[in-house]
Amino acid sequence: MHGNHLHILYLNPHLTRPNSEQGTWGRKFVDELRGLGVEVTTYPEYSIHQASPTCSRSGQNRQLSRFFKSYSPNWLQHVFIEFMSIARGLWYSFRLGLWAKQFKSHPPDVIYGRVSYCDWAPWLIGHTLCRPIILEVHSPHYLERTFRGWKQSRILQKYEQLQWKYASLIRVVSKPMVKILEREGITPERISFIPYGVEILPQRVKDPSCHSSNLTIVFVGSFYSWHGVRILLEAVALVKQHIPDLTLELIGDGQTFHGDKQLTRILGLEDIVRFLGWLPRHKMLDHVRFADIAVAPFLHIEPFYFDPVKILDYMSTGVAIIASRLERIAEMLHYGRGGILVPPGNAQVLADNLVILAKNSHLREQLGIAAQEILEEEGYSWESTAQRVKGLCQEAIEHKGPPFSEVDASG
């Protein structure tokens, strides 16, 4: 690093998928750092002027993935995904190694990599260039597999433990991940919690002539059993008895998609439930912003290692939120200030609170405003996040720990 100039090599294999959550967040992250005067080189290469590809191919891939997850046995999913994860990680690392020859004359000051399954690219390029490595860790993938009904992977666990060990510093985007990494033997001074960045959107202008019975409820997320879509459908069936004029929009896809559609028919909700599938991020946020209530009906899982992105998206739009009363979600919503908290897995209580919110537009507005205030107070803005990451990169340059202690000791 020369003077105040900072050059980061940012590694994120999802950058070429701008319609994915990981690609969208990655591109915004790069743009914010560049706005702070940081030189950011990305792999895969990305510039703000690049056009976004259409999402037809990704839509086809999701349909194939949904079919595979719905109709193949778990052991076959586990074997296939294990093989593909390792192969993809090795191929990505090999391509990066060839591409990185350009850095001989202008090496970066720090390597910053978003961790993916079996991805050795950050370590390989950092070791080759003798530069510090920052890993952005979103989850313990070997544990995440079990929540999706797959067998826990010992191979993947060892991969991840080595990745964490050889990182100079680690950025986590959820507070529970700090404790998980500490239990894995990572010293606290090497771990920094820097949350996702969000853009706080203008609240929609409420139509004073709109009656409480004209109700739109929205859910965003992956369709896994612990996301609680089944509980939400059962609750909406109860709400319909009191408020017949309502719509439930389900945005996303996943393992329980077909089962949830079947339950919709059984409960007689086909006329009010809309399965919208995955949407580009800006369209998804529009649906959330113009809804009356957004729901995050998570079931209890252990460990609850993440800060749900859907909660942050809901908060950013100023929509009224109902979410499961789980420790981290309650903390994010300031224990009810930014949203109503309900017991996980209880459709009746969820329905009761949906009815309360449906009939109280003033309460909905208060909750939405409070949620946006929490984001500002807690430093979740993109500018704040980028500033903190920049500082972390500068800290890593002075760091003398793994993986370069041997290099430093040898002189």
Image (cartoon, rainbow, N blue to C red):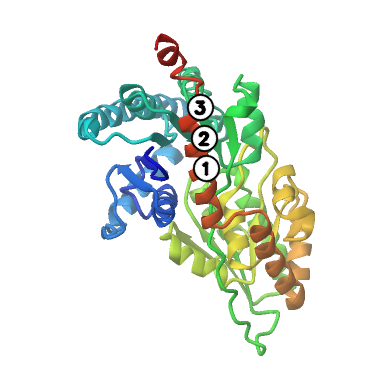
Up the image or down, 357 lies above or below 399; here it is below
Residue 343: x, y in percent?
A: 78, 49
Up the image or down, 84 lies above or below 15; here it is above
Q: Given the image, on which type of amino acid does mark 2 rest?
A: Glu
Residue 263: x, y in percent?
A: 58, 54
Q: Badges 2 and 3: C-beta atoms under 8 Å apart?
A: yes
Q: Given the image, on which type of amino acid does mark 3 rest?
A: His
Residue 50: x, y in percent?
A: 26, 58
Q: Badges 1 and 2: C-beta atoms under 8 Å apart?
A: yes
Q: Marks 2/3: CA distance? A: 6 Å
Q: Which residue position is annotated with label 1?
A: 391
The residue lying at 60 percent from left, 82 percent from top is: 205
* Quadrant hosting residue 304: top right
Residue 69 in view (yes/no): yes
Foreground residue among 273 and 370: 370
Q: Quadrant of the C terminus?
A: top left
The residue lying at 75 percent from left, 73 percent from top is: 242
Q: Which residue position is annotated with label 2?
A: 395
Foreground residue among 144 and 181: 181
Residue 148 in view (yes/no): no
Residue 399's tag is 3
Crowding around mark 2 (Cα neighbors within 10 Å: few <14, some 14 to 19, many 20+) is few
Up the image or down, 67 lies above or below 85; here it is below
Residue 402: x, y in percent?
A: 48, 20
